[in-house]
Image (cartoon, rainbow, N blue to C red):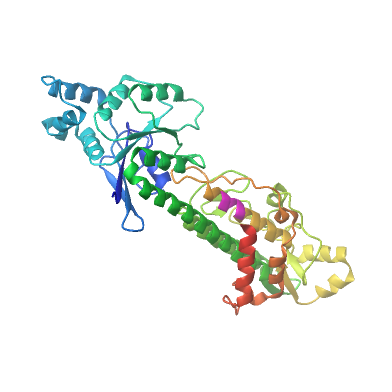
Amino acid sequence: MLTTLKLAVIGHANVGKTSLLRALIRNSHFGTVSDKPGTTRQVESITFPLEQNKNIIFYDTPGLEDSLSLYDYINQLVSTNNKLDGIDKLTIFLQSPEAQNLFDQEAKVIKQLINSDAAIYVIDVREPILAKYHDELAILAYSDKPIVAVLNFIANEEQNEKEWKRLLSRVGIHAIIRFDAIFPPLDGEERLYQTLALLVEPAKAILDDWLTKIAELRNSRNQTANRIIAETLVDVTAYYEMAKLDDKQVIINMQNKVREREQNAINELLRLYQFDSAQENEENLPLIKGRYKADLFNVEALKTMGMHLTKGFVSGATIGASIDLAVGGTTLGSAALIGAAVGGLMQTAKHYGSRMRNKLSGYSKLSVDDVIICFLSLRLIYLKESLNHRSHANSGPIKLSKLDKSEWEKGKLPTSLKVARGHSQWSTLNKGTKRHDKRRQSTIRKLSEQLH
């Protein structure tokens, strides 16, 4: 019974072998990726332990750089014996002097291929069919190992997929998977492992366990992400400050604390999905060095999402984004300090009558507006969805996926979150937080389920 499945990732130089592995093992730091040929010079491996002492080991191999000369050299070595099979030819080559000199890189690949249970042959479909690829596949065909061909970079408009499939069929490789390492299809991983299970029948149990583990990890990450978002929303909703009319600094401090709480949530999500925070993007809701450039309290950011400030006030006043803050154009980082403050609150008070003006005459209990909270929830949900489908081989900007319209976009808080308004002790932004309060935990749990 096979307990360890060894998979060699092979192919020509710069076809995306390391990138494919990064996507499969969900590690954006594995190996070295570069446009320069010969970036991977040694065989690197990573082991994934499963239950019952089962393992899967991936081997990232150097690129095959000079297959034309290698093919001729091997044929010269065995020219006096036409009865040798493929493995004999490769064995003789590995014992030759040039295996440690001129063809050192190719020898590493062939040796790892022979010592593996199967190979994943990565192809850059943007490349034209050249003679070197014919010879490369002929050499690999000498081995007795099953090979799955992975067509990489299929998202690119200029490609030669049909020509590559024709070549693969001619050399006897019929197991072909379309799997773009940068933009992988949702079912790409499953199809790859299912194909390997057909080719390496003794490894079927290992691969089935691996697919189960992948599904469990995906579900666990999603649940944890929902809880991170839910706890953030409870913190911001239950947060308040007591302030006087002329205390602009309190409002600025409140906005900064909410921004910081959002940033902490962003960092938690990125760590959960094992991504770097230093990603840049120019989308409507970008991440720049770990924070959204479109600030929570920015009017244009709200308009982009179709958000409008609510007309209801919970208690006292709200920290919103409908009226410019009278700070003479002061900025904090890349985000304008825009919100309801002294002048804004007075204008709002006039709009809502004498009762509001009276309430604002002394100390008021300032809370965060419902729309800001809804905006915050959307940003975090969009980020989570993008990370759920993002490849770890993708070094480009984090692009936020589009979600269907929901009650969050209407500026209306769900019941499970409205409860937090009356429990200031639930917010970690307030003093005397009761983080482990049973009702707080129950509210976070219910909200997490709603996000799911």
Say which quarter of the image contains residue 203.
Answer: top left
Task: Name the residue located 13 percent from the left edge and 30 percent from the top edge.
Answer: 92
449 left or right, relative to 98: right
Q: Is residue 37 above or below residue 255?
A: above
Magenta portion: prevailing SS class: helix
Q: Residue furthest right?
A: 354
Task: Name the residue located 55 percent from the left edge and 55 percent from the top edge.
Answer: 291
Task: Name the residue located 67 percent from the left edge and 58 percent from the top edge.
Answer: 337
**Is 382 covered by the magenta stretch?**
yes
Q: Is residue 252 above or below residue 26?
A: below
Where is residue 325? Give x, y as percent: 72, 60
Q: Nearer the viewer, residue 348 or 156?
A: 156
Task: Name the residue located 58 percent from the left edge and 48 percent from the top edge.
Answer: 286
Q: Is residue 256 visible?
A: no
210 left or right, relative to 61: right
- Span colored in magenta: 381-385
Say which quarter of the image contains residue 421.
Answer: bottom right
Q: Residue furthest bottom?
A: 432
**Is 291 covered by the magenta stretch?**
no
Where is residue 158? Give x, y as percent: 49, 25
Q: Is residue 154 visible?
A: yes
Quadrant the C terminus occupies: bottom right
Q: Is residue 335 above or below residue 11?
A: below
Where is residue 391? Give x, y as percent: 47, 45
Q: Is residue 176 above or below residue 399?
A: above
Q: Nearer the viewer, residue 428 or 82?
A: 82
Q: Nearer the viewer, residue 41 or 359?
A: 41
Where is residue 441? Give x, y as percent: 60, 72
Q: How many marks?
A: 0
Q: Nearer the viewer, residue 388 or 250?
A: 388
